Amino acid sequence: MKVTIKDVARHAGVSFKTVSRVINQEPAVRQDTIDKVQQAIEALNYQPNSAARNLASTKSYAIGFIYDNPNAYYVIDMQNGILQACRENHYELMIHPSDATASDICDQLTALVKRSRVAGLVLTPPFSESAKIVAILEQLDVAFVRIVSGSGEGKIDPNCLYIDDRQGAYAITEHLLELGHQRIGFLCGDNEHQSSLERLEGYKQALRDHQLPVEPELILEGHYSFDSGVSNAQTMMARPVPPSALFACNDEIAAGALFAAQLGGVKIPQQLSIVGFENSPFSRQTWPKLTTVDQPIVTIARQATEQLIRQLRGHAEPQVQRFVPQPVLRDSSQPPSA
């Protein structure tokens, strides 16, 4: 027969309400009591029934992940990170892809929150960077954590986890500059993502700090897609004086740029260096493997979810969580040829 919470309570010699408080990590439970309950749970191999727990309680034990991102690798890593934190804290994960550009997106999210009774939401760009989405969720009085692009300097917001894309972009641009490249093309991602703007600013600042001009013809607007990388790299290589290096706003764009270069008979990295951003599988599935910037999505997602759960339990601390992506040097970058 299936082990119940009452079986755990009998085994531990406590009330089933005490077991519930331990499972939900509620405060004011003595450590020796927690230890007894945990030992009973392990001995009986008890698995909490989240559906029954939701029905029996005024609380919800489901975390919602709302996203609008075409990059499957990003979405899967985000899901895995959130799921790790949910499992460790006895929450369920509800995944809800949405179209951030839909005219009725606020109505959709309102209906979702009311219908599903989620305890809280993990928001990723572009939802996390939308002022109207944040305003709606605050009106609904639902807990949420936003993963946003920015340094977080001077801010104390328990609802945010910051990724310093600007500093990561600065570092990878500086890598190319230190190799000797002076004409570096920049292939943008979607403008509605703050990460695109932050990475572009990091690129520009690195050029300025090395006393090099920011040349508008070396910056091309685009999308976070392979096709965008192909077309923009072809445009860049057709310039009268093409750049000796390309900085793509993510690895998928970089993989497209690499494909375009190889189609055009351009040797990588002997004739053109290409770097990406995010350290996704795209960066390791190309030949040569891409120099990139590591953005640990699984870790970021997990910490954001843990931050949300602390908030739900009243343990949120007024501190800034900040990730600074770091360069990963591989085979697609080297000093420019003579």
Image (cartoon, helix red, strand yellow):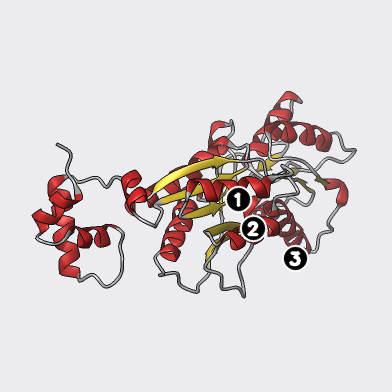
**Residue 229, located in which quarter of the rendered image?**
top right
Q: Nearer the viewer, mark 2 or mark 3?
A: 2
Of residue 280 and residue 46, the one placed in the foreground of this image is 46
Could you give the CA–CA distance between mark 1 and mark 3, rounded to whole angstroms?
46 Å
Q: Nearer the viewer, mark 1 or mark 3?
A: 1
Does residue 156 appear to the left or right of 101 in the view shown?
left
Specify whether residue 171 is in view.
no
Could you give the CA–CA distance between mark 2 and mark 3, rounded to whole angstroms?
41 Å
In terms of sequence position, does the residue under pointer 1 or pointer 2 come before the other?
1
Of residue 151 and residue 155, the one placed in the foreground of this image is 155
Identify the image quadrant of the C terminus: top right
Mark 3: which secondary structure?
Answer: helix
Residue receiving disc 3: 209
Q: Amino acid at mark 3?
A: Asp
In the rendered image, residue 268, in percent from the top left (x then y), is placed at 67, 34
Seen in the picture, residue 7 relative to 242 is either above or below; the reply is below
Q: Amino acid at mark 2?
A: Ile
> Can you tell which mark lies on residue 110?
1
In the rendered image, residue 232, in percent from the top left (x then y), is placed at 79, 36
Of residue 114 and residue 83, the one placed in the foreground of this image is 114
Seen in the picture, residue 245 relative to 198 is either above or below; the reply is above
Q: Amino acid at mark 1?
A: Thr
Q: Are marks 1 and 2 in contact (CB under 8 Å)?
A: yes
Residue receiving disc 2: 136
Residue drawn 66% across and 55% down?
133
Mark 2: which secondary structure?
Answer: helix
Q: Residues within 10 Å of mark 2 (few under 14, many from 20)?
A: some
Could you give the CA–CA distance between mark 1 and mark 2, rounded to whole angstroms?
8 Å
Seen in the picture, residue 303 relative to 338 is either above or below; the reply is below
